[in-house]
Amino acid sequence: KAGVTQTPRYLIKTRGQQVTLSCSPISGHRSVSWYQQTPGQGLQFLFEYFSETQRNKGNFPGRFSGRQFSNSRSEMNVSTLELGDSALYLCASSPRGLDTQYFGPGTRLTVL
Amino acid sequence: DQQVKQNSPSLSVQEGRISILNCDYTNSMFDYFLWYKKYPAEGPTFLISISSIKDKNEDGRFTVFLNKSAKHLSLHIVPSQPGDSAVYFCAASEVTGANNLFFGTGTRLTVIP
Protein backbone atom coordinates (compact mmCIF):
# COMPACT_ATOMS: atom_id res chain seq x y z
CA LYS A 1 0.00 0.00 0.00
CA ALA A 2 1.39 3.41 -0.91
CA GLY A 3 2.17 5.69 2.02
CA VAL A 4 1.14 9.25 2.69
CA THR A 5 2.51 11.58 0.05
CA GLN A 6 3.02 15.30 0.33
CA THR A 7 3.78 17.80 -2.38
CA PRO A 8 5.85 19.76 -2.82
CA ARG A 9 8.67 18.54 -0.61
CA TYR A 10 10.39 21.90 -0.48
CA LEU A 11 9.06 25.39 -0.99
CA ILE A 12 10.51 28.88 -0.73
CA LYS A 13 8.21 31.87 -0.47
CA THR A 14 8.52 35.50 0.59
CA ARG A 15 6.66 37.33 3.31
CA GLY A 16 3.11 38.29 2.40
CA GLN A 17 2.66 35.55 -0.17
CA GLN A 18 0.34 32.62 0.25
CA VAL A 19 1.06 28.93 -0.14
CA THR A 20 -0.89 25.73 -0.69
CA LEU A 21 0.41 22.36 0.41
CA SER A 22 -1.07 19.05 -0.68
CA CYS A 23 -1.44 15.71 1.05
CA SER A 24 -2.61 12.40 -0.39
CA PRO A 25 -3.54 9.96 2.36
CA ILE A 26 -3.21 6.22 2.33
CA SER A 27 -5.97 4.67 0.28
CA GLY A 28 -9.04 4.08 2.42
CA HIS A 29 -8.06 6.54 5.14
CA ARG A 30 -10.69 9.18 5.74
CA SER A 31 -8.94 11.22 8.39
CA VAL A 32 -6.18 13.66 7.53
CA SER A 33 -4.38 15.77 10.12
CA TRP A 34 -1.85 18.54 9.63
CA TYR A 35 1.01 19.42 11.95
CA GLN A 36 3.67 22.12 12.05
CA GLN A 37 7.14 21.19 13.25
CA THR A 38 9.61 23.86 14.32
CA PRO A 39 12.83 23.43 16.33
CA GLY A 40 11.56 25.40 19.31
CA GLN A 41 7.97 24.18 19.50
CA GLY A 42 8.20 20.64 18.26
CA LEU A 43 5.14 19.23 16.54
CA GLN A 44 1.98 21.27 16.85
CA PHE A 45 -1.44 20.17 15.70
CA LEU A 46 -3.06 22.40 13.11
CA PHE A 47 -6.33 20.68 12.21
CA GLU A 48 -7.94 17.40 11.26
CA TYR A 49 -10.37 16.65 8.48
CA PHE A 50 -12.63 13.65 8.32
CA SER A 51 -14.92 12.99 5.38
CA GLU A 52 -14.47 16.53 4.05
CA THR A 53 -15.33 18.18 7.38
CA GLN A 54 -12.98 19.85 9.79
CA ARG A 55 -13.34 17.77 12.95
CA ASN A 56 -10.67 19.31 15.17
CA LYS A 57 -8.64 22.48 15.17
CA GLY A 58 -5.50 23.48 17.00
CA ASN A 59 -4.52 26.90 18.22
CA PHE A 60 -3.35 28.56 15.02
CA PRO A 61 -4.49 31.87 13.49
CA GLY A 62 -7.05 32.02 10.74
CA ARG A 63 -4.28 32.48 8.15
CA PHE A 64 -3.96 28.71 8.33
CA SER A 65 -6.81 26.90 6.64
CA GLY A 66 -7.43 23.60 5.01
CA ARG A 67 -9.88 21.51 3.15
CA GLN A 68 -10.47 17.92 2.21
CA PHE A 69 -11.82 16.60 -1.04
CA SER A 70 -14.17 13.72 -1.66
CA ASN A 71 -11.23 11.42 -2.44
CA SER A 72 -9.78 12.30 1.03
CA ARG A 73 -6.90 14.28 -0.43
CA SER A 74 -6.30 17.38 1.62
CA GLU A 75 -4.80 20.80 1.07
CA MET A 76 -3.51 23.29 3.58
CA ASN A 77 -3.30 26.97 2.79
CA VAL A 78 -1.34 29.65 4.58
CA SER A 79 -2.07 33.23 3.61
CA THR A 80 0.01 36.35 4.25
CA LEU A 81 3.10 34.37 5.10
CA GLU A 82 5.30 35.46 7.98
CA LEU A 83 8.92 34.57 8.68
CA GLY A 84 7.77 32.47 11.65
CA ASP A 85 5.79 30.22 9.34
CA SER A 86 9.03 28.63 8.19
CA ALA A 87 8.68 25.04 9.31
CA LEU A 88 8.22 21.44 8.32
CA TYR A 89 4.54 20.78 7.67
CA LEU A 90 3.52 17.19 8.23
CA CYS A 91 0.38 15.48 7.15
CA ALA A 92 -0.90 12.28 8.75
CA SER A 93 -3.69 9.99 7.65
CA SER A 94 -5.65 7.51 9.67
CA PRO A 95 -8.55 5.14 9.15
CA ARG A 96 -9.83 5.84 12.61
CA GLY A 97 -7.75 6.93 15.59
CA LEU A 98 -4.65 8.23 17.24
CA ASP A 99 -2.50 5.13 17.23
CA THR A 100 -3.14 4.51 13.60
CA GLN A 101 -1.80 7.77 12.23
CA TYR A 102 0.66 7.43 9.38
CA PHE A 103 2.79 10.45 8.63
CA GLY A 104 4.04 11.71 5.31
CA PRO A 105 7.59 12.97 4.82
CA GLY A 106 6.55 16.59 5.16
CA THR A 107 6.87 19.80 3.18
CA ARG A 108 9.72 22.07 4.19
CA LEU A 109 8.51 25.67 3.85
CA THR A 110 11.00 28.51 4.01
CA VAL A 111 9.72 32.07 4.19
CA LEU A 112 12.23 34.78 3.26
CA ASP B 1 2.58 26.95 26.56
CA GLN B 2 4.12 23.52 26.07
CA GLN B 3 1.81 20.94 27.62
CA VAL B 4 4.13 18.05 26.82
CA LYS B 5 7.80 18.43 27.60
CA GLN B 6 10.87 16.45 26.76
CA ASN B 7 13.60 18.14 28.73
CA SER B 8 16.51 16.20 27.27
CA PRO B 9 17.15 17.25 23.68
CA SER B 10 19.69 14.48 23.19
CA LEU B 11 20.83 11.17 24.63
CA SER B 12 23.76 8.91 23.77
CA VAL B 13 23.83 5.25 24.74
CA GLN B 14 26.15 2.35 24.03
CA GLU B 15 24.80 -0.46 21.89
CA GLY B 16 23.29 -3.20 24.02
CA ARG B 17 22.57 -0.93 26.97
CA ILE B 18 19.22 0.50 28.03
CA SER B 19 17.94 3.79 26.61
CA ILE B 20 15.51 5.73 28.77
CA LEU B 21 13.67 8.65 27.25
CA ASN B 22 11.56 10.83 29.49
CA CYS B 23 8.47 12.94 28.99
CA ASP B 24 6.47 15.16 31.34
CA TYR B 25 3.04 16.67 30.84
CA THR B 26 1.02 19.33 32.57
CA ASN B 27 -2.58 18.67 31.50
CA SER B 28 -4.24 16.31 33.96
CA MET B 29 -6.95 15.60 31.36
CA PHE B 30 -4.52 13.73 29.14
CA ASP B 31 -5.25 10.05 29.26
CA TYR B 32 -3.71 8.61 26.14
CA PHE B 33 -0.01 8.75 25.36
CA LEU B 34 2.07 7.77 22.37
CA TRP B 35 5.69 7.61 21.33
CA TYR B 36 6.81 8.28 17.78
CA LYS B 37 10.19 7.76 16.17
CA LYS B 38 11.43 10.02 13.41
CA TYR B 39 14.32 9.47 11.01
CA PRO B 40 15.71 12.38 8.97
CA ALA B 41 13.69 13.23 5.86
CA GLU B 42 10.83 10.96 6.97
CA GLY B 43 7.63 11.58 8.87
CA PRO B 44 7.22 10.28 12.43
CA THR B 45 6.39 6.60 12.82
CA PHE B 46 4.14 5.35 15.59
CA LEU B 47 6.07 3.24 18.08
CA ILE B 48 4.00 2.41 21.15
CA SER B 49 1.11 3.82 23.14
CA ILE B 50 -0.41 3.59 26.59
CA SER B 51 -3.74 4.58 28.04
CA SER B 52 -4.15 5.92 31.54
CA ILE B 53 -5.76 2.73 32.82
CA LYS B 54 -2.36 1.07 32.56
CA ASP B 55 1.01 1.93 34.03
CA LYS B 56 3.08 -0.17 31.65
CA ASN B 57 2.89 -1.36 28.09
CA GLU B 58 5.46 -3.55 26.42
CA ASP B 59 6.16 -4.31 22.79
CA GLY B 60 9.32 -6.24 22.12
CA ARG B 61 12.33 -4.17 23.07
CA PHE B 62 10.15 -1.14 23.80
CA THR B 63 8.36 -0.51 27.10
CA VAL B 64 6.46 2.60 28.07
CA PHE B 65 5.86 3.42 31.72
CA LEU B 66 3.23 5.89 32.91
CA ASN B 67 3.19 7.59 36.31
CA LYS B 68 -0.05 9.58 36.37
CA SER B 69 0.50 11.08 39.80
CA ALA B 70 3.82 12.52 38.64
CA LYS B 71 2.48 13.31 35.15
CA HIS B 72 5.50 11.50 33.75
CA LEU B 73 6.07 8.83 31.18
CA SER B 74 9.18 7.14 29.95
CA LEU B 75 10.20 4.93 27.07
CA HIS B 76 12.71 2.16 27.72
CA ILE B 77 14.56 0.50 24.86
CA VAL B 78 16.38 -2.68 25.78
CA PRO B 79 18.78 -3.59 24.31
CA SER B 80 19.53 -0.46 22.31
CA GLN B 81 20.62 -0.97 18.71
CA PRO B 82 22.32 1.45 16.28
CA GLY B 83 19.15 1.42 14.14
CA ASP B 84 17.30 2.96 17.07
CA SER B 85 19.20 6.21 16.50
CA ALA B 86 16.47 8.73 15.69
CA VAL B 87 14.45 11.53 17.21
CA TYR B 88 11.77 10.31 19.61
CA PHE B 89 8.63 12.32 20.26
CA CYS B 90 6.13 11.70 22.99
CA ALA B 91 2.56 12.83 22.45
CA ALA B 92 -0.54 13.07 24.58
CA SER B 93 -4.24 13.48 24.07
CA GLU B 94 -7.52 13.76 25.84
CA VAL B 95 -9.40 10.88 24.27
CA THR B 96 -12.36 13.12 23.65
CA GLY B 97 -10.08 15.35 21.59
CA ALA B 98 -10.06 12.82 18.77
CA ASN B 99 -6.97 13.40 16.68
CA ASN B 100 -5.71 16.44 18.54
CA LEU B 101 -2.30 15.39 19.73
CA PHE B 102 0.10 17.48 21.78
CA PHE B 103 3.70 16.65 21.05
CA GLY B 104 6.91 17.18 22.95
CA THR B 105 9.91 18.78 21.26
CA GLY B 106 11.70 15.48 20.82
CA THR B 107 14.83 13.74 22.10
CA ARG B 108 17.57 12.75 19.68
CA LEU B 109 18.84 9.29 20.60
CA THR B 110 22.25 8.18 19.37
CA VAL B 111 23.18 4.55 19.90
CA ILE B 112 26.93 4.12 19.69
CA PRO B 113 28.11 0.82 18.20
Image: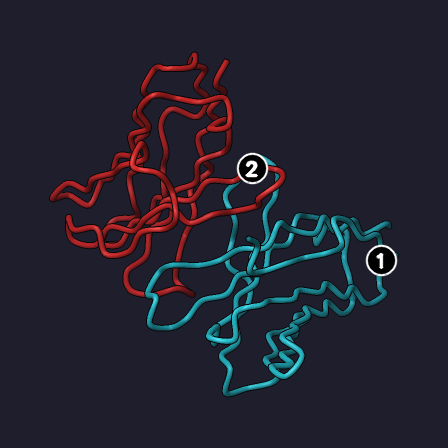
Chain under numbered label 1: B
Residue A6, above or below A111: below
Instruction: Give the percent coordinates (x, y) of residue B55.
Output: 60, 85
- Tags 1 and 2 in contact by the CB under 8 Å rule? no
The image's mark for residue B15 is 1
User: x%, y% of residue B90?
Assistant: 58, 60
Depth order, front residue of A48/A80 = A80
Residue that appears at 38% across and 42% down? A60
Of the residues tagged 1 and 2, which is closer to the observer? 2
Taking the image as shown, residue B45 lies to the left or right of residue B94, namely right
The vertical placement of A69 against A83, above or below, is below
Q: Quadrant of residue A18?
A: top left
For this rendering, which residue is in front, A1 or B32? Answer: B32
Q: Which mark is residue A38?
A: 2
Q: Name the foreground residue: A28 vs A41.
A: A41
Q: Which chain is cyan?
A: B
Circle 1: is it few (<14), some (14-19), or many (20+) Cα within 10 Å?
Answer: some
Which of the two residues, A71 or A38, is positioned nearer the viewer here? Answer: A38
Check if mark 1 and mark 2 are on a common chain. Answer: no
Task: Give the left or right position of residue A39, taking residue A7 as reference.
Answer: right
SS label for mark 1: loop
Q: Position of residue B2 (x, y in %)?
A: 57, 54
State the residue at coordinates (60%, 81%): B68
Q: Which labelled disc corresponds to residue B82?
A: none
Residue at position x 33%, y 28% in the image: A78
Which residue is rendered at x = 49% and y = 79% of the image? Answer: B51
> Which amino acid, by three-letter code, is at mark 2?
Thr
Asked which quadrant contains residue A15, the reply is top left
Q: Amino acid at mark 1?
A: Glu
For marks 1 and 2, give the CA distance: 30 Å
Chain A appears what colour? red
